């Protein structure tokens, strides 16, 4: 019998509370190589808390998280930095530096994770390739303030991809965009996943984005994994809690 693919991310029995607010309740999931997994949940259901725990911007109260074979709880800062080079993160806010050009924004991860020699040799071609990937080569010397919301999102995506991560985490990638731009970004996410053969975890409640990007959807309700299925099967579900997202 063929062995199941080894998960890229394993979240095991994670709990996270803020005072009386029990956000994640014994939450577990596995993400396998090459899939685009969407975490769907209402506002305030704990999606961002989960993704922050995965990248160790936040500490769970209990449970275990393993990313690319590393139990992240046991990592020191240096090991964590190494792991983060393999995990791209697209923030909801884009988190671009307004005082830096597009080129400087894209060089930022290289400054953290590459040596001076590596940067001198490869930074320019990496920046240009990442910009070409997202169709914005001509913006290399522009400031983020000169770009539209959709363009800023593309630049943030280029920056998340520049180190060619094996895992990409997307926090509500289409929030705040008009429907046409949102669709373009969703399609770009799929083509980037194909080009780099990355594994993606996407937090979203944009049903169109989920339809375009997902291979599988986990529904987070009251801190638990309420459903775990394809978009199409969930769309056909008669469960009222699931229907709420589609109707
Ligand atoms: N640092 C924090 N301190 C206290 N409470 C927090 C903190 N971060 C998140 N929370 C709480 O955890 C719950 C889940 O928040 P989270 O941001 O994960 O929601 P979400 O599902 O991502 O929502 P949205 O779709 O609106 O972004 C909320 O009740 C929120 O108030």
Image: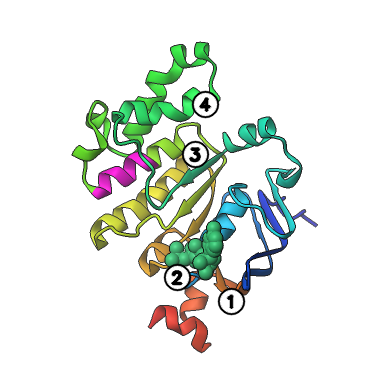
The mark lying in front, picked from 3 and 2, is 2
Q: Is residue 152 magenta?
A: yes
Name the residue that disc number 4 marks.
112
Disc number placed over residue 222 in the picture, else none: 1
Magenta span of residues: 149-156
Q: Is residue 217 magenta?
A: no
**Relative depth, front residue between 204 and 34:** 204
The mark lying in front, picked from 3 and 4, is 4
Query: Is 109 above or below relative to 3?
Result: above
Residue farthest right in this picture: 1
Could you tell me if residue 238 is visible in this image? no
Mark 3–mark 2 distance (CA, rounded to whole Å): 31 Å
Question: Which quadrant would residue 221 be assigned to in this image?
Answer: bottom right
Comes first in the chain, label 4 or label 1: 4
Comes first in the chain, label 3 or label 4: 4
Q: Tell me the element at label 3.
A: helix
Disc number placed over residue 43 in the picture, else none: 2
Q: Are marks 3 and 1 in contact (CB under 8 Å)?
A: no
Name the residue that disc number 3 marks.
196
Q: Is mark 2 within 8 Å of ligand 1?
A: yes
Secondary structure character of the magenta stretch overall = helix
The mark lying in front, picked from 3 and 1, is 1
Q: Considering the image in quadrants, where does the N terminus appear?
A: bottom right
Q: Is residue 59 left or right of residue 237?
A: right
Mark 4–mark 1 distance (CA, rounded to whole Å): 37 Å
């Amino acid at each position: 019998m063929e062995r199941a693919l080894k998960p890229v991310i394993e979240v095991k029995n994670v709990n996270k509370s803020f005072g009386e607010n029990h956000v994640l309740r014994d939450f577990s999931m596995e993400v396998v190589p090459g899939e685009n997994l969407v975490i769907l949940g209402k506002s305030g259901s704990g999606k961002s808390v989960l993704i922050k725990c995965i990248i160790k911007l936040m500490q769970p109260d209990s449970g275990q998280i393993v990313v690319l074979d590393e139990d992240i709880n046991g990592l020191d800062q240096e090991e964590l930095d190494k792991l983060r080079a393999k995990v791209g993160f697209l923030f909801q806010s884009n988190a671009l530096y307004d005082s830096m050009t597009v080129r400087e924004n894209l060089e930022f991860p290289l400054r953290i994770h590459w040596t001076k020699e590596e940067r001198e040799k490869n930074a320019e071609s990496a920046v240009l390739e990442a910009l070409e990937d997202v169709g914005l080569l001509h913006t290399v010397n522009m400031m983020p303030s000169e770009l539209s919301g959709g363009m800023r999102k593309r630049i943030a995506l280029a920056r998340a991809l520049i180190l060619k991560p094996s895992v990409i985490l997307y926090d509500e990638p289409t929030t705040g965009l008009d429907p046409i731009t949102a669709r373009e970004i969703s399609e770009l996410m799929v083509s980037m996943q194909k080009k780099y053969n990355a594994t993606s975890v996407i937090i979203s409640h944009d049903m169109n984005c989920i339809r375009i990007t997902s291979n599988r959807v986990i529904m987070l309700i009251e801190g638990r994994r309420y459903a775990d299925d394809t978009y199409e099967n969930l769309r056909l579900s008669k469960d009222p809690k699931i229907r709420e997202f589609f109707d």
